[in-house]
Amino acid sequence: MARLDSVWATVKTVVKPLGKWSLLLGLVAVSAIAFAGCNPSQFTAAEVATSRIVFSSLGDPKTFNPALSQEYPNIFIYTSEGLLTLDGETGDIVPALAESWEIADDGLTYTFTLREGLQWSDGEPLTADDAVFTYRDVIFNETIPASGRDSFRIGQEGLLPAIEKIDDRRFKFILPEPFAPFLISAGGGILPAHSLQASVDMLDAEGNPQFLSMWTTGTPPAEVISNGPYRLKQYLPSQRVIFEKNPFYWQADAQGNSQPYVQELIWQVIESSDNQLLQFRSGGLDVIGVSPDEFSLMKREEDRGNFTIYEGGPTLGTTFVTFNLNKASRDGTPLVDPIKSQWFNSIAFRRALSYGIDRQTMINNIYQGLGEPQTSPLPVQSPFYASPADGIPTYDYDLEKAKELLLADGFQYSPTGELQDAEGNRVRFTLITNSGNKIRESLGSQLKQDWSKLGIQVDFQPISFNALVTKLSDSLDWEAHIIGFTAGLEPNGGSTVWSVNGSLHAFNQNALAGQEPLEGWETAEWERRISDIYIRAAQEVDEDKRRELYFESQRLAQEYLPFIYLVNPLNMGAVRNTIEGINYSGIVRPFALWNVPELTVATE
């Protein structure tokens, strides 16, 4: 499932998708204030005695409701579990809440059997009623903007499966036609019917299900019911989220000892990647993503700092710059200035700006040579990945080619070298990204410089991650941004991005359920073609034919450039040697903590 991604280079922590962004001040007094909320010395002696793993994020969680989560990282990595999950070593689908499943010969019926004795974090039984509620009443409910729904849509009509209870432990999905990625789609978290059913049935004053306002970050943690290895214990905004072991979690080791072994997880909110690195180096964090520009320093400190740097190959996520192609209005006001919208919707303009990006300098200067130009929304580890050798268009740095495209498209240059459109309007726009992420801030600074060579003025403005998410998913009032998406080995997880009605169709987002509607929203022909390919590829059970379809979708994505991909860096993370059982994954998030129930913490 694709989600808005802080990736390892963004949040400086290592976390997963199935399947939710302050510079270091020189004054000692100010620094003391900034770190008071995340310094381990602030914990009591009893708290320190509790086994824990501490990691960090640039921002606070946006919601405690897993069905409404679109950002990454999120708390559900540790608190929510689905029917199935992925093995971090092999990428294979393995049982989670479901102990087994059967697929009918016609491929249309999937019958699941839950593990015996499952319980929620409040001790209530977890049964087939919860699974039916989760899918029938929430995920498949069109009045709820559930991020997971898009990955279940089947066929041209976007039909959804039916779900029926058999008994307390068994239930079945009935599909309208074969759907190759169904098991991957079914990996999302299950919700507690006993806690949330009433909120789905009751409507608020605006006619929306009260579920939309359930389990916000203002909800007391004790009221948030979970089924994962951990449950919420405490949330202090702008400081930390504390997770405690879920005493009712089902997993146990071969000797019958309950898991997880580690009693607490601490998510520290540290709003600068520089400060995150400082906290790790001073012993305040146990896990951190290592960006390429930090690798040399961190490698020299491995022994002294008692940690190990792990490398999981190319990162699974994407990093890109995109322009707002939305031509719609809200309450009569265009989301994007019509003059700028005309630029952004020009294919020649987008191609020219892609040619105008010096990606090799990005790799050399920002990523210290530890990366490659990115040319696809799919990770190179996916069997459906198409490389430039497969005919995927690429855009090597070529200023002359960029200028030729712009001039042929009606743009012109003023006597002072400023790029103007045919009506004489200066080409100038605002580029945003999440503040505190020095990689993305560096990317934005270079894009500003690169595009200035084409006569374009870029107003680069890093903003808080939550403000960024609000702009991208709700208000839709932005011009260009740098961000990233998570990705998985199965391309259908990206349907929420590539479907024209997807909840993460970020470059041309329609209003979602519960949001103020748009007027005049429209889609391009190539946009609908990609959306259609994702539908057909999910229907196709022949792997070779699916591969051909996904190759075509990647070709179209690079030809029309709704996302202009930048660099695919290496996935690296540093973990304290006191954490035992680390089996670093390059294919399943959280890369270092994907098997967190099996980890232990040794005393130094």
Image (cartoon, rainbow, N blue to C red):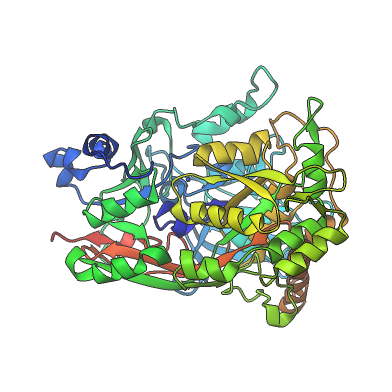
Instruction: Tell me: residue 281, above or below residue 360.
Output: above
Instruction: Tell me: residue 253, above or below residue 159.
Output: below
List x then y, in percent, for residue 549.
Answer: 77, 71
**Number of dots carrying numbers:** 0
List x then y, in percent, for residue 555.
Answer: 76, 70
Along the horizontal axis of the image, is 108 left or right of 598? right
Residue 407 seen anywhere in this rendered image of the structure: yes
The residue at 70%/53% (across/down) is 455
List x then y, in percent, for residue 285.
Answer: 27, 53
The residue at 40%/58% (across/down) is 14
User: In front here: 235 or 85?
Assistant: 235
User: In front here: 118 or 344?
Assistant: 344
The image quarter containing residue 333 is top right
User: In front here: 315 or 221?
Assistant: 315
Q: Quadrant of the C terminus?
A: bottom left
Along the horizontal axis of the image, is 148 left or right of 249? right
List x then y, in percent, for residue 353.
Answer: 71, 59
The image quarter containing residue 354 is bottom right
The residue at 38%/32% (across/down) is 237
Along the horizontal axis of the image, is 175 left or right of 30? right
Q: Residue furthest top?
A: 205
Residue 6 seen anywhere in this rendered image of the structure: no
